[in-house]
């Protein structure tokens, strides 16, 4: 007969060996995970640094573009002011010449004035981008005789309005070229 021995010491040894193996595997896995975690944290830190650097460079570029746009606006305003002053000086000189050279004689007859007014009223105004349609132009009432001095003054007033508008458009164009590179 074979003596019966209890398997408890073998089971206990197997359990102890399994526990030691599990603990060793757990420790090894922990060390491997720690390395992965450290690499992941380093990558996240690197991404944060790259993002901060990108944001800093973007803010600097934005500030530079804003400064260039502000400088362009200052230059455009200075040019507009210079052009308006030069035009107003020329306008003043021409006005005094008109008063000096005009004779006071009638230069546009009544029928011609009426025809010019009708031609202006017949010219349709351009459509607006939004909003109500513009009112239709009506011929102006005939104010009587137009002297050469009044006609010269009217021409200078129209030229002054045109030059002011043109100078403003040029200032906007100059600012846009610097600000948007167009």
Image: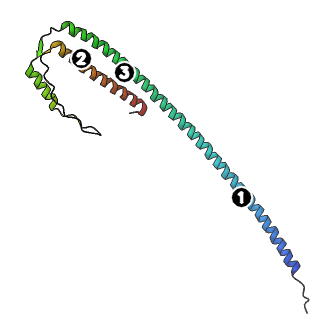
Identify the mark nearer the N-term, 1 or 2.
1
- Examine the image and state in which quarter residue 107 appears: top left
Q: Residue furthest left?
A: 111
Between marks 1 and 2 in the image, the one whose residue lies nearer the viewer: 2
Say if 54 sits above or below 35 in the image. above
**Total of numbered circles in the picture?**
3
Q: Position of residue 179 (x, y in %)?
A: 43, 31
Say if 172 sits above or below 43 in the image. above
Q: Tell me if mark 2 has few (under 14), some (14-19) or many (20+) residues whose alpha carbon lies within 10 angstroms of its own.
A: some
The Cα–Cα distance between marks 1 and 2, rounded to whole angstroms, is 86 Å
Indicate the secondary structure of the residue bearing disc 3: helix
Indicate the secondary structure of the residue bearing disc 2: helix
Q: Nearer the viewer, residue 166 or 14?
A: 166
> Is there CB contact under 8 Å for labels 1 and 2?
no
Q: Residue at x 45, y 29 (%)?
A: 69
Q: Tell me if mark 1 has few (under 14), some (14-19) or many (20+) residues whose alpha carbon lies within 10 angstroms of its own.
A: few
Q: From the image, tell me which residue sits under label 3.
A: 80
Q: From the image, tell me which residue sits under label 2.
A: 156
Identify the mark nearer the N-term, 2 or 3.
3
Q: Nearer the viewer, residue 7 or 135?
A: 135
Q: Residue at x 56, y 40 (%)?
A: 55
């Amino acid at each position: 007969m074979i003596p019966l021995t209890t398997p408890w010491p073998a089971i206990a040894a197997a359990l102890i060996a399994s526990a030691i193996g599990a603990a060793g595997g757990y420790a090894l896995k922990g060390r491997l995970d720690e390395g992965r975690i450290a690499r992941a944290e380093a990558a996240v830190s690197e991404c944060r640094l790259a993002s901060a650097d990108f944001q800093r460079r973007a803010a600097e570029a934005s500030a530079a573009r804003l400064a260039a746009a502000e400088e362009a606006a200052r230059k455009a305003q200075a040019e507009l002011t210079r052009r308006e002053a030069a035009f107003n000086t020329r306008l003043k000189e021409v006005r005094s010449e008109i008063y000096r050279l005009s004779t006071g004689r009638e230069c546009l007859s009544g029928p011609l004035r009426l025809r010019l007014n009708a031609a202006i009223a017949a010219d349709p105004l351009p459509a607006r981008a939004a909003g109500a349609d513009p009112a239709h132009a009506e011929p102006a009432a005939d104010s009587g005789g137009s002297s050469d001095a009044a006609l010269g003054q009217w021409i200078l007033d129209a030229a002054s309005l045109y030059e002011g508008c043109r100078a403003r458009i040029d200032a906007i164009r100059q600012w846009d070229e610097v600000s948007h590179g167009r």
